[in-house]
């Protein structure tokens, strides 16, 4: 099986699991006290009810949305170019991107957000404004960044119509998203105020933006193909920008979707981070990576320049990029990045000793608790906090008061350290 399916859950994934154990009404109330909307957790609640609580079950939901995004990407490119080869190659680039692969196997809402954004864009390009608005509204209940994409969709509608858009079409697009925002806006403001006082993010810098660009191309791992993939990707991007800049194509994805749906959410998140509170993080903007690949694929699928030299260069670059992308994606699928919490709990389960387990750091308590549940270990799991409090960004809304201890046991307990290792204290 694919190793990424079975790597140890990390803190945010374990948080998703324990929140999804709650009832739908509890999920709504708890997410209002956390940092994200409730739709993904509610869906995960029913998903685990149907398919179980294993890592495979938890992560397969994200993978399903990633595969759905690949399919919608092919539809968008074919719609705009009427070329199945360009649609196939672009969707292949989406499928195998190392950064997207990583989050396709993470129990979080990011691929769901991307699927909803892409599907909303697809319906907008087909002038199905109400359906586009429906998926945008669902995205708003999935992640707070969806508001930035809604602004982009409205801009696309305003700029891509041959004539000024009909008033009815405009209202169909914004009706459901406005209702969604109206019901959740006050909660978002309270969430952002908590981010300002207790979150871990810092203001974005030019270096952090370069880091995002680098991660989007090669992912989070270091590997032998990394530099080859980065420079090949950079050359392909530059060719696409050159084609976009000097072509006379007037189709929406080329002239509007790239600057609007791709750049605008990034710019808005940076503005909010610099002026109100830091909210910028590359994984929150994952939908822009899907859109970037689509934009590049669209431009390169269109015959903008017929000169044989340009065509040969384009063929060489695309072939080299895909040839480098395939082994990179295989490496990514086989390289877990999380702490080995699962291995430590498996070791504990075979020792037949210890009356309790204590996570020394709140950062890995939830995943420790998850694996004790998976291994059916009948000993309590606690988290040590000297002052008895847990930072909210760690997922404190799913912590029970009885989970927290302020003094360590004298003896006979298992200690789980911050790196995921375990040792017995006799």
Image: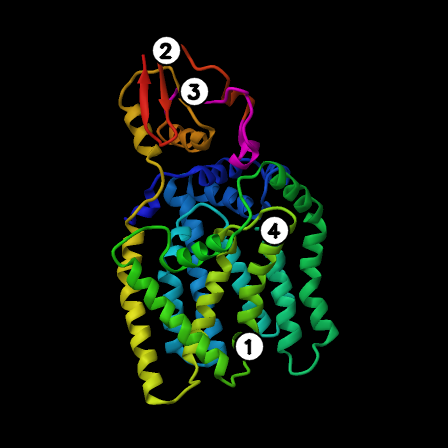
Q: Which residue is mark 4?
A: 274
Residue 128 picture quarter? bottom right
Query: Taking the image as drawn, is residue 25 in sight?
Result: no
Q: Which residues are magenta?
A: 377-399
How far apart are the alpha carbons under marks 4 and 3?
A: 43 Å
Q: What residue would you read off at disc 1?
A: 255
Which of disc 2 and disc 4 is earlier in sequence?
A: 4
Residue 160 is a magenta residue: no
Secondary structure under badge 3?
loop
Give me the residue at 44% from left, 15% from top: 408
Residue 181 drawn at (x, y percent):
69, 53
Q: Is residue 192 left or right of residue 77?
A: right
Q: Which mark is residue 411?
A: 2
Nearer the N terminus, badge 4 or badge 3? 4
> Residue 380 — which label?
3
The image's mark for residue 178 is: none
- Earlier residue among tags 2 and 1: 1
Q: Is residue 348 left or right of residue 179?
A: left
In this view, which residue lies farthest toward the front? 206
Is the residue under label 2 in contact with that under label 4 (CB below 8 Å)?
Answer: no
Which quadrant of the figure has residue 57?
Answer: top left
x, y percent for residue 74 = 43, 70
| Image vertical order of residue 412 relative to residue 377, above or below | above
Q: Marks 4/2: CA distance?
A: 48 Å
Q: For the residues marked 1 and 4, what is the alpha-carbon distance in whole angstroms?
A: 28 Å
- Secondary structure of the residue carrying numbered label 1: helix
Query: Badge 2 local density, few (<14 within 10 Å), some, or many (20+)?
Result: few
């Amino acid at each position: 099986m694919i190793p990424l399916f079975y790597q140890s859950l990390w803190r945010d994934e374990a948080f998703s699991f324990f929140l999804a154990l709650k009832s739908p009404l509890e999920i709504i109330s708890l997410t209002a006290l956390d940092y994200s909307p409730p739709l993904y957790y509610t869906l995960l609640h029913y998903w685990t009810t149907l398919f179980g609580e294993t890592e495979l079950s938890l992560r397969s939901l994200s993978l399903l949305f990633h595969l759905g995004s690949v399919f919608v990407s092919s539809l968008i490119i074919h719609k705009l170019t009427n070329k199945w080869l360009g649609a196939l190659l672009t969707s292949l680039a989406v499928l195998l991107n190392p950064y997207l692969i990583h989050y396709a196997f993470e129990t979080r809402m990011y691929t769901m957000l991307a699927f909803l954004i892409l599907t909303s864009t697809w319906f907008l390009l087909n002038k199905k404004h109400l359906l586009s608005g429906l998926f945008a509204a669902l995205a708003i209940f999935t992640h707070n960044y969806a508001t930035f994409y809604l602004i982009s969709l409205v801009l696309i509608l305003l700029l891509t119509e041959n004539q000024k858009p009909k008033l009815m079409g405009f209202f169909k697009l914004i009706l459901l998203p406005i209702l969604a925002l109206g019901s959740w806006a006050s909660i978002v403001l309270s969430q952002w105020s908590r981010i300002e006082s207790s979150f871990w993010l810092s203001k974005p810098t030019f270096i952090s933006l370069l880091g995002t660009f680098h991660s989007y191309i090669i992912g989070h791992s270091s590997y032998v193909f990394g530099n080859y993939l980065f420079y090949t990707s950079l050359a392909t991007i530059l060719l696409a920008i050159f084609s976009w800049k000097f072509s006379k194509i007037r189709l929406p994805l080329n002239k509007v979707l790239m600057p609007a749906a791709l750049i605008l959410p990034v710019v808005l998140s940076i503005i909010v981070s610099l002026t109100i509170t830091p909210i910028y993080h590359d994984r929150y903007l994952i939908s822009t990576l899907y859109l970037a690949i689509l934009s590049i694929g669209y431009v390169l699928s269109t015959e903008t320049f017929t000169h044989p030299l340009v065509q040969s260069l384009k063929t060489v670059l695309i072939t080299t990029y895909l040839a480098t992308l395939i082994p990179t994606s295989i490496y990514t699928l086989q390289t877990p990045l999380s702490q080995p919490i699962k291995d430590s709990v498996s070791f504990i389960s075979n020792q037949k000793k210890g009356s309790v387990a204590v996570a020394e750091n709140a950062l890995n308590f939830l995943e420790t608790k998850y694996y004790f549940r998976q291994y059916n270990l009948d000993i309590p799991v606690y988290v040590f906090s000297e002052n008895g409090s847990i930072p909210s960004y760690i997922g404190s809304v799913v912590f029970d008061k009885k989970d927290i201890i302020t003094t360590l046991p004298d003896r006979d307990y298992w200690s789980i350290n911050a790196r995921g290792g375990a040792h017995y204290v006799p």
